[in-house]
């Protein structure tokens, strides 16, 4: 069922992006950035490329299950915060971010509700480059990659000697991004754009064992040893999409609202882990180089 939903989601994204390409031929006059002027060297373009520090807040709807402890799904809302660095124009885009989500997802089976204290950390770095043949003054296509490491810390005292879950999921993605300029033709129109990004994991890994012991619990039977018998398993599946609307202010800062979908499924048999995230976030981007 998880894989069917994932395939449906990706097919929907491809259909929408295809329609976007077909409707992108209508040209508008878009105010150019200094780094987008013709005749610049790579060094000059890099120096003039706008750079931003971002402050992000939002909410994240999560759903997961850990077959090493239970086949039941835990789901609920978590709080999302983060910080990011972005340097981008229509030719190249570099981004790094650190995010943190926390909350108490629940499961309710046979009228026996239980919750898990959930903490999610995410660190990523991305590079994207323009595909000139698929871009024009109104529409930009970029391709590249992203390295993402996601870590989960889950605590559920009702699971006794297996109450603590701690795992990491490093992933190398192939990425493509479509950006549609929406600024209009007015001379003093504020710049704004809508972008769609799709990431597909090409190297998917998980560092976990599924059985770790909660400090202070069950010590009569097992001495706590957090990383005992951990293994790095290179297998599984991961994909994500992001839809961003960005509006640039007259002081060269920007406001951004985003929806992000992320899903991953580890390999293995009895110790598989599955998770899906639906994140709605708001960001204030502070321009740091006055470009």
Image (spheres, rainbow, N blue to C red):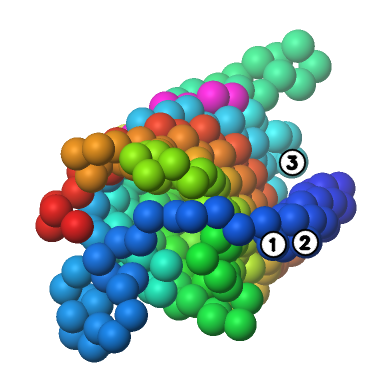
Of 228 and 61, nearer the camera is 61
Give the x, y percent position of residue 21.
72, 62
Using a 10 Å C-alpha cutoff, classify the residue at mark 3 as few (fewer than 14 neighbours), some (14 to 19) or many (20 or more). few
For this orientation, the residue located farthest to the front is: 187
Q: In the image, what residue occupies the spot 60% across and 38% down? A: 278
Q: Are marks 2 and 1 in contact (CB under 8 Å)?
A: yes
Using the image, determine if residue 235 lies above or below residue 137: below
Give the x, y percent position of residue 108.
71, 19
Region rendered in magenta? 76-81
Corner quadrant of residue 286: top left
Q: Main secondary structure of the magenta part?
A: strand
Secondary structure found at label 3: loop
Q: Which residue in the structure is indicated by mark 1?
A: 25
Of 172 and 27, nearer the camera is 27
Residue 114 visible from this viewpoint: yes
For this orientation, the residue located farthest to the left is: 289
For this orientation, the residue located farthest to the top is: 111
Give the x, y percent position of residue 139.
57, 62
Structural distance between the alpha carbons of marks 1 and 3 = 49 Å
Q: Which residue in the structure is indicated by mark 2?
A: 22
Q: Are marks 3 and 2 in contact (CB under 8 Å)?
A: no
> Is residue 49 found left or right of 101 in the rendered image?
left
Structural distance between the alpha carbons of marks 2 and 1 = 7 Å
Q: Are marks 1 and 3 in contact (CB under 8 Å)?
A: no
Q: Which residue in the structure is indicated by mark 3?
A: 71
Of 283 and 236, nearer the camera is 283
């Amino acid at each position: 069922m998880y894989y069917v939903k994932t395939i449906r989601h990706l097919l929907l994204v491809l259909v929408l992006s295809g329609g976007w390409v077909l409707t992108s031929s209508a040209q508008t006059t878009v105010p150019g950035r200094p780094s987008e002027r013709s005749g610049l060297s790579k060094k000059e373009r890099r120096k003039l490329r706008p750079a931003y520090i971002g402050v992000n807040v939002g909410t994240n709807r999560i759903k997961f299950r850990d077959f090493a402890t239970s086949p039941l799904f835990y789901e609920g809302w978590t709080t999302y915060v983060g910080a990011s660095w972005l340097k981008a124009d229509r030719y190249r885009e570099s981004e790094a971010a650190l995010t943190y989500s926390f909350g108490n997802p629940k499961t309710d089976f046979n009228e026996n509700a239980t919750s898990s204290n959930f903490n999610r950390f995410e660190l990523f770095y991305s590079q994207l480059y323009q595909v000139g043949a698929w871009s024009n003054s109104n529409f930009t296509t970029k391709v590249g990659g992203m390295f993402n490491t996601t870590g989960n810390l889950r605590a559920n005292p009702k699971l006794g000697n297996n109450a603590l879950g701690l795992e990491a999921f490093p992933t190398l993605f192939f990425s493509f991004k479509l950006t549609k300029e929406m600024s209009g033709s007015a001379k003093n129109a504020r710049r704004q754009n809508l972008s769609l990004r799709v990431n597909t994991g090409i190297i998917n890994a998980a560092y976990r064992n599924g059985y770790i012991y909660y400090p202070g619990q069950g010590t009569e039977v097992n001495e706590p040893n957090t990383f005992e018998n951990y293994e790095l398993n290179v297998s599984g599946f991961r994909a994500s999409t992001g839809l961003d609307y960005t509006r640039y202010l007259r002081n060269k800062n920007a406001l951004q609202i985003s929806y992000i979908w992320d899903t991953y499924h580890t390999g293995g048999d009895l110790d598989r882990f599955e998770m899906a995230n639906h994140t709605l976030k708001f960001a204030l981007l502070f321009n740091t180089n006055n470009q």
